Amino acid sequence: MSSTWWKEAVVYQIYPKSYYDSNGDGIGDLAGITEKLDYIQSLGTNVIWLCPIFKSPMKDNGYDIADYSVVDTIFGDNSALDTLISEAKKRDIKILLDLVLNHSSNEHPWFKAALADPDSPYADYYIFKHWDKPTPPNNLRTYFDCSVWTRIPNSNRWYFNSFGPEQPDLNWENPQLRKEIIDMINMWIKKGVAGFRIDAIGNLKKSPESLSEHRFEADREDGSASLVPWVLNQPGIDKFLTELADKTFKPANSMTVAEIDVPEKDLLAYVGENGYFSMVFDFSIADLDIRHQKPFTTSPITGESLKPVFIKSQLDTQRIGWGAPYLENHDQPRSLNKFLPKGAINSISAKMLATFLLTQRGTPFIYQGQEIGMTNCSMTLEEHDDLHVFKLIEWGRREGYSDEQMMEYFNLRSRDNSRTPFQWNDKDNGGFTTGKPWLKVNPNYVEINAEQECSDKKSLFSYYQQLIALRRHSDISDILIYGDFIPLDSPSDVIAFKRQHEGKMVNIYCNFSGEEKPLSINEQQIYLHNSPIVNDKEGKIILQPYQAIIMS
Ligand code: NOJ
Ligand code: CA
């Protein structure tokens, strides 16, 4: 196992619109992030992943790019990014940008040129189809629950989109388009970014069927079929990804984390020693509560349901390469609400989840606010500001779901739960802005905020600091970073594993239940725990509700 700087990193993810607003317009910005670098450094994280900051109409909050070379004015300008990069560097923090390569905005000049003139070379930068019927060429449904085909008004021209209609897919078959993308990436590498998070990368290659008039077997009552089997990781994608990696990331030795669920058989190509990427985000844990669910329903996650999925994810990745564990991101609700039953969210259980994340094999990703215990935020339908929510509401109303049912689902599952402004203190708007925040601030900022967390040695924030220090700068760092992952037998709802490196080992026990769980082991050297240790008469440990222990 070769050692590399990014294997030793702990990443902090920032959703720029919601981090810190430096100029009172209600929207977080780059100068705001720069102001908060000392905070990020004090947590111990040493890489920042910035969600998209490029010019965009913000229909999908920057995942709809209208110019890949320019910072959007709501975030500042290119020199604000230079400042952020150089100020971060002074603190030994590296910056990852978010690359959205599967689609652009419909306001990108390429797309506008393609619309204006079907014979323009830019028409081949996208995927158009001539179709003179009133309904779309096929019944595939996007990730955002609408048709993959959007008709250009007053015409028989349609274009393909894997997400919203505002996000036309780019045609990766076109070598000129690929060259533009490669040049753009190299331009950012030259500016000093350490790497990239790469959006929806598994969708670059479309199957011939997906672009045809094929009638796909419906998987929903409305007669639509998910696009996933027809656009994800299709034969031929290897050509695009090899070229992309060889001409950009590999020569620059960039850290890359790709957003894609890779089937086990293909992991080697993606994250093996010579894979396209440093690591990939897998969705098996993050989507466990919705994976096989009907629309607008979730199934609660328990320690028992999580255990096999977690062990498989760790073992599969370990066999081949490196992983990128996470519990939260800007597409997911808050982890406290997802992984803990209602009524069990408290400082102990939050610290248990933190232990679970920071002791896994792979580079851990922490999402802004996770370190202070931010939770989901109830919203009315009108309070939401997310394209996917808007599309789901349209779809749900058409299919007869009630607003109440949708609202209940969104309050558990919408992406806005994690996108609410960061809670800095107990002042107005949680100290995020002096203006009107672009999205509702969670009213619990009065109790849950960074100022409070940073001033309390027993807080969740302090516990994250200790965990990160243990992982990055302690006697057991090499074990926690490079150690093998070995699952341990454990009582129900307890997730237990060993990390082992060059004959040394660390054992981790996480109780995902509110019950005591007797272990058949005596107390060893303990490195960190979230609540007092309790032993039975023979000195064996009785794991307490939601207790986590790291010991030798
Ligand atoms: C995945 C991103 O994380 C998400 O926020 C976005 O909406 C889609 N890809 C489309 O770019
Ligand atoms: Ca601002």
Image: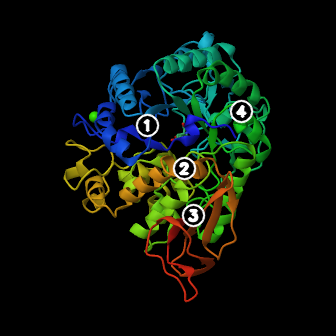
Q: Amino acid at mark 2?
A: Ser
Q: Is residue 57 shown above or below 229?
A: above
Q: Nearer the viewer, mark 1 or mark 2?
A: 2
Label 2: few (<14), some or many (≥20) within 10 Å? some
Which comes before the other along the chain, label 1 or label 2?
1
Ligand 2 - quadrant of the structure image: top left
Q: Is residue 306 visible?
A: no
Give the residue drawn at x 58%, y 68%.
Answer: 509
Q: Nearer the viewer, mark 1 or mark 3?
A: 1
What residue is pinned by disc 3? 297
Q: Nearer the viewer, mark 3 or mark 2?
A: 2
Mark 1: is the Cβ under 8 angstroms from ligand 1?
Answer: yes
The secondary structure type at the circle numbered 2 is helix
Q: Is residue 356 visible?
A: yes
Q: Does residue 40 appear to the left or right of 436 in the view shown?
A: right
What residue is pinned by disc 4? 275
The secondary structure type at the circle numbered 1 is loop
Q: Amino acid at mark 4?
A: Gly
Q: Which corner quadrant of the image does residue 23 belong to? A: top left
Gap between marks 1 and 3 measured at Cα:
25 Å
Give the residue drawn at x 28%, y 36%.
Answer: 35
Across and down, in percent, residue 144 comes to 56, 44
In the foreground, 85 or 114: 85
Which comes before the other along the chain, label 4 or label 2?
4
Across and down, in percent, residue 262 comes to 71, 43
Which comes before the other along the chain, label 1 or label 3?
1
